[in-house]
Amino acid sequence: MKDQYNREINYLRLSVTDLCNLKCQYCMPADGVDKKSHNEILRIESYTKLVEAMTKLGVNKVRLTGGEPLVRRGILDLVKTIGSMREVKDLSITTNGVLLKDYAQKLKEAGLNRVNISLDTLNPVKYKKITRGGNFEEVINGIGAAKEAGLLPIKINVVVINHFNTDEIMDFIRLADEHVEVRFIELMPVGEVATWNKQKFISNQVLIDRYMDLFESQDSVYNGPAEYFIKKDNQGKVGFISSISDHFCNSCNRIRLTADGKLKLCLHSNREIDIKEALKLDANKLLSYLEDLIFNKPDQHYINDTEFIPVLRNMVGIGG
C-alpha cells in the first residue's frame, strides 16, 4: 500500500528479541538490558498474524532482527512459517554472526533467503573491545557457514566510527572480493550512542570521496537505502548507507515492530504504537487498523534540526 506521501510500503522489519549475546558499545549499555517478562514479548503466533495481515497490504519483504534474532526461542519455526507465505518474496535476517555456524544450514532449510552480518572491525582485539567480549573467529566461521548454506548475497554491515575503524575501510573494501557485499553505515544517534561524542561520527561522503578511485561505476540495480559502487577490478560491490548526512526518507518503504509489540513508523522518532491488543482483533479489523497507521507514516526524520530529540530506545531494542 501507499502512505500519504505516495511511498510504497512493502518492507517489514521484525525485532524478535531485545536480548543479545554481545554488548556492542553503540547498541547496548555496558550493564546490558533488563530482561522483559514473558508477557511483554510477542509470541511467535503474533508475528505470524501480523505478517499475514501485512502481506495483504502489499508487504513482500520481511527481515528478522533483534537484539540477536538467533537467541530467540522458536526462531526456526518463525522462519519456516514466514518462508512458506507465497506473498513474501524476500525473507532475510540481520545477525551478529556468532551463532551462524550452527544455524546457517537450518535457516536455509527453513526458508530463509539471505543474511546480513554486523561486523565493525576485522581486528580481533578491537572486535572484543567494541562488542565487550565477542569472539571474532566465531563470526568468520559464521560467514563461511552462510556461504556454504547458500544464504546469498551475504551483506556485511559496518557501522563507521571515527577513530575506531576508519583505518580499516580499505580492508573492508578488499573483503568485497570474498563474495560478500560490504556496506558502510553512518553512526546514528539512537539510544546509547546518542550520548557519544559527536566526533565519533563521520559522513559517508568523506569515505566516498576518499576511495572513489577504486570504483568503476555506480550500481543502479539495487533498491533500498544503500548507494552501491562496483569495484574497478569487478570483484565486488561496496555500499554506503547515509541515513544522517543524506537521508532517503522520500523513498522510505519500511516499518518496524519491536519485540514488545510497538510499531515504529520511523526509526528516528520516539513515537511508538503499541499494537499488542490490536493483534487480537479479527483479520479484517486488524487490516483496517494497520492500513490507517501506515498511511500516516511521517514524511521524514528531523535529526539535523536543532530541536531534535534523540530516540530513547536503545538500538538493541529496535534492530536497525
Image: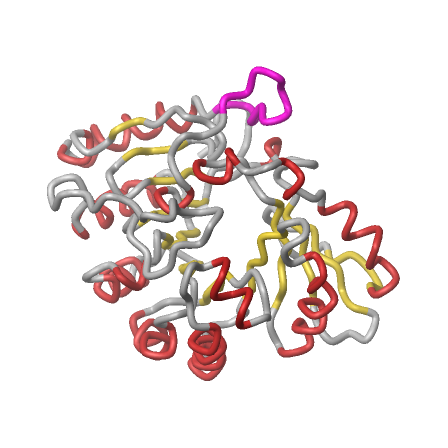
Give x and y (percent) for residue 259: 27, 44
Q: Nearer the viewer, residue 171 or 266?
A: 171
Residue in view at x 46 percent, y 84 percent: 148
Q: Compared to 151, does 221 lie above or below?
A: above
Report whether 262 appears left or right of 26. Answer: left
Could you say where residue 308 lies in the image, as x and y percent from the top left?
A: 55, 20
Q: Residue furthest right?
A: 213
Residue 71, picture quadrant:
bottom left
Q: Which residues are magenta?
A: 298-309
Q: How would you classify the magenta stretch by its main secondary structure?
A: loop
Whole-percent x and y of residue 84? Answer: 29, 63
Q: Where does the image place residue 243, in percent across and percent down from the top left?
A: 61, 39
Residue furthest to the top:
307
- Residue 187 falls left or right of residue 311: right
Residue nearest the viewer, comparing 120 with 132: 132
Above-or-below relation of 287 to 82: above
Identity of the residue drawn at 47% across and 78% down: 137
